């Protein structure tokens, strides 16, 4: 049996056709998205069609089940006719930071963390609804239904205008869902929308079918899974268990783990999400990850391979250079208006090698702080699985174990979000109690010079304290 998993991310749509028996990828397709923080959802639909056609055309047999994973938090606002009211605001759009602050002031961080698993920041959908009400009241008045990106694509694939669905994982990133009870909290929507609550999608269990595909010829008749958020899908694709922490270094950076119990962090550092299997997924996210390396390479007049060479020629600690890599503002720590800062510059250390090293160390220090935050809410950290585009960097692989303080394993390069969506599709199609077991092959990197890594991290923390308090 062949299944298809789709990853509708910030930058592109990836579609994988997978053998449900062993998880091997037999065909794939890809279509890019514009690099914006707000976007017409029709762009996703067109990219979905293009990526699926590429994958299905190359597949050795028909696809029997499909699931969609999508970028979390994005607000897709629909009117009563199902028409998109405005471009979707994505997770990396920070305009709703004032609304996030006011929600926290009104309710208190501890109360919101207990009710929703989250302390509001600009990424979360609830804050975007509040922004819509304050800044586009005409659109807010016409709002009938609000969906997340993966919800909207699943809804389009099903062709059923009356039924929209989601899953616990993606729902738990909205700010108006209770991970503990697995129920919506529509009163929070009413609060920010002047006592009007939009229709919210039906929350399906992890292996519950969402119907069949009717609106894409290449997939017509395939069973449709509930889908999930991208981080939940990555966890499912990797098959992680307690003790594993995944660090994903893509457009954004994330660190997450699976737990049996929900968690609420009143500091707001850890988001208490649900996962895609019925468990929970405490997670931290940074806005600045692989693009920090891209930008630094560009500034140094080289490419990523050249950046690796420069960084690995420098000594650990970059002779005192420290980069706070908040090039696009930051979510963790919550500094939406921050900019990047290079500290410790002297005549003798301002070299391309040290600048490259500082970029890699700065990006990884932010994620190492995230791993510590997971420990602080009770997560056991036995190993780190390093994924994402920047996991291919030789410098990232070499430096990460020293800064993370534990052994790092790098799974073979794969689209783990799309692979997780495919695994969900196979699970739904099989009707079994547990998802299929697929092998995971990794390359291991031992944690060494951990004491030196802690010194580098201490300098990073001191720099952040000096600049941002």
Image (cartoon, rainbow, N blue to C red):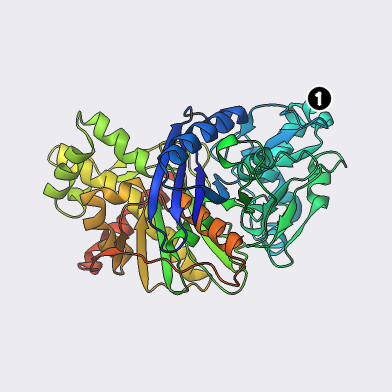
Q: Can residue 346 be seen?
A: no
Pinpoint residue 58: horizontal percent, then vertical percent: 40, 40
Total numbered badges shown on the rendered structure: 1
Does residue 318 lie above or below 153 as drawn? below
Q: Is residue 413 left or right of residue 110?
A: left
Q: In the figure, residue 168 lies in which quadrant?
A: bottom right
Does residue 41 lie above or below 432 as drawn? above
Does residue 135 lie above or below 62 as drawn? above
What residue sits 42% from the left and 59% below the top? Answer: 23
Q: Residues within 10 Å of mark 1 (few under 14, many from 20)?
A: few
Observer-nearest residue: 9 or 50?
A: 50
Q: Which residue is mark 1?
A: 138
Observer-nearest residue: 363 or 60?
A: 60
Q: Is residue 58 left or right of residue 455?
A: right
Q: Can residue 225 be seen?
A: yes
Does residue 360 lie above or below 409 as drawn? above
What residue sits 59% from the left and 35% below the top? Answer: 217
Observer-nearest residue: 176 or 432?
A: 432
Pinpoint residue 457: horizontal percent, then vertical percent: 32, 58
Q: Is residue 397 left or right of residue 330?
A: left
Pinpoint residue 151: horizontal percent, then vertical percent: 66, 45
Furthest residue in direction right, as rendered? 195
Pinpoint residue 469: horizontal percent, then vertical percent: 47, 49
């Amino acid at each position: 049996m062949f299944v298809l998993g789709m990853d509708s991310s910030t930058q592109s749509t990836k579609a994988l056709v997978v053998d449900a028996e062993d998880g091997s990828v037999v065909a794939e397709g890809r279509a890019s998205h514009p690099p914006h923080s707000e976007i017409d959802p029709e762009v996703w639909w067109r990219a979905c069609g293009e990526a699926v056609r590429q994958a299905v055309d190359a597949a050795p047999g028909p696809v029997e089940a499909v699931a969609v994973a999508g970028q979390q938090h994005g607000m897709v606002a629909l009117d009563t006719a199902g028409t998109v009211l405005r471009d979707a605001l994505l997770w990396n759009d920070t305009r709703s930071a004032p609304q996030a602050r006011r929600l926290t002031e009104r309710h208190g961080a501890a109360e919101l963390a207990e009710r929703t698993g989250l302390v509001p920041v600009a990424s979360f959908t609830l804050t975007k609804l509040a922004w819509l009400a304050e800044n586009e009241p005409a659109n807010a008045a016409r709002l009938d239904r609000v969906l997340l990106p993966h919800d909207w694509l699943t809804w389009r694939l099903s062709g059923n205008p009356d039924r929209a669905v989601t899953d616990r994982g993606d729902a738990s990133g909205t700010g108006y869902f209770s991970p503990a009870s697995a129920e919506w909290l529509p009163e929070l929507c009413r609060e920010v929308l002047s006592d009007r609550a939009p229709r919210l999608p039906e929350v399906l269990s992890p292996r519950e079918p969402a119907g069949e595909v009717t609106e894409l010829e290449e997939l017509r008749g395939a069973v449709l899974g509930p889908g999930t958020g991208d981080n939940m899908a990555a966890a499912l694709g990797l098959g992680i268990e307690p003790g594993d922490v995944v660090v994903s270094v893509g457009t954004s950076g994330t660190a997450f783990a699976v737990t049996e119990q929900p968690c609420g962090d009143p500091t707001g550092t850890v988001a208490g999400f649900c996962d895609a299997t019925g468990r929970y997924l405490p997670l931290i996210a940074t806005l600045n990850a692989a693009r920090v390396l891209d930008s630094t390479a560009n500034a140094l007049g080289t490419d990523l391979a050249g950046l690796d060479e420069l960084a690995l020629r420098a000594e650990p600690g970059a002779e005192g250079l420290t980069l706070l890599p908040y090039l696009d503002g930051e979510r963790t720590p919550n500094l939406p208006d921050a900019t990047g800062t290079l500290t410790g510059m002297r005549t003798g250390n301002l070299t391309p090698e040290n600048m490259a090293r500082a970029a890699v160390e700065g990006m990884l220090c932010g994620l190492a702080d995230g791993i510590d935050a997971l420990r602080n809410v009770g997560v056991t950290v036995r190993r780190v699985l390093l994924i994402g585009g920047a996991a291919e960097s030789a410098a990232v692989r070499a430096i990460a174990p020293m800064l993370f303080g534990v052994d790092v394993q790098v799974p073979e390069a794969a689209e783990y979000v799309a692979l997780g969506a495919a695994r969900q599709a196979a699970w739904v199609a099989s009707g079994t109690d547990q998802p299929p077991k697929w092998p995971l092959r990794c390359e291991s990197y031992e944690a060494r010079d951990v004491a030196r890594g802690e010194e580098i991290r201490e300098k990073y923390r001191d720099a952040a304290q000096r600049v941002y308090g």
